[in-house]
Amino acid sequence: MVLAGGRATRMGGGDKGLLRLGAGTLLDEVLARLIPQVARAAINANGDPARFAGQGVPVIADGVAGHQGPLAGVLAGLDWAAAEGASHVVTVAADTPFFPCDLVPQLQLAAEGSEEAIAIAATRGGEEVLWHPTFGLWPVALREDLRAALARGDRRVAEWARGHNAAQAVFPDADAFFNVNTPADLDRARRMIG
């Protein structure tokens, strides 16, 4: 599930995933990395799904009202995965076009050691491990727990994941999780894609 429901306020609004990058868009780059790693792909976004019609994957809106952030997108992914008969969903951010091409297998390996089969992508920043919580592997079995957490007002992906003893899949390249939040970031991404 590509999480594309953000409001892109630092970019001036709109859909960051539809910004031009290389020969296509940010979303094209994200889907090109995700699709080979998963059985099925979808986009989580609110509003008119027609704007993503060219992507060739379903568009799933949040199942909870009020733009509750990426945690609501994780829940939308879990509900979609349950309807598809899947046991897990992987989430990635629509504004992070360089994530690892082995993200899913590394998350699966990390989840094997997790009590609740949750794994979050991470990188090392010196001695510190930095989480990238929108990049995660989530078991469908926890969707009602997540729904209850959102109803209580929980909004932070990392906090909810930590509460379930999420494992970490640590990747060596911090730039792999570089995300585009501002026009300067988009310029950097364009240089990176070269």
Image: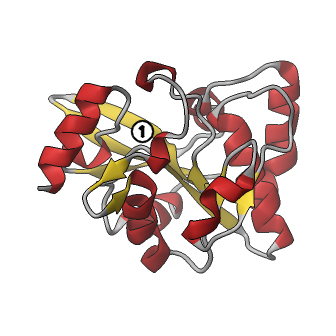
User: Disc 1 residue type?
Assistant: His
Q: Which residue is mark 1?
A: 132
Q: Nearer the viewer, residue 182 or 100?
A: 182
Identify the residue at image location x=81%, y=29%: 150
Q: Is residue 139 visible?
A: no
Residue 109: give x, y in percent of width and height: 44, 66
Residue 1: give x, y in percent of width and height: 61, 58
Q: Is residue 93 above or below residue 129?
A: below
Q: Quadrant of residue 126?
A: top left
Mark 1, Cα crowd under 10 Å, few <14 / some 14-19 / many 20+, is many
Q: Is residue 51 left or right of residue 22?
A: right
Residue 24: give x, y in percent of width and height: 35, 62
Residue 108: give x, y in percent of width and height: 49, 66
Q: Is residue 170 left or right of residue 92?
A: left
Callout 1 secondary element: strand
Q: Quadrant of residue 187?
A: top left
Q: Is residue 102 left or right of residue 74?
A: left
Q: Is residue 28 visible?
A: yes
Q: Is residue 153 above or below residue 121?
A: above
Looking at the rendered structure, the number of numbered marks drawn on it comes to 1
Identify the residue at image location x=18%, y=37%: 188
Scheme of image coloration: secondary structure
Identify the residue at image location x=73%, y=27%: 68
For the C terminus, give its image quadrant. Answer: bottom left
Identify the residue at image location x=74%, y=28%: 67
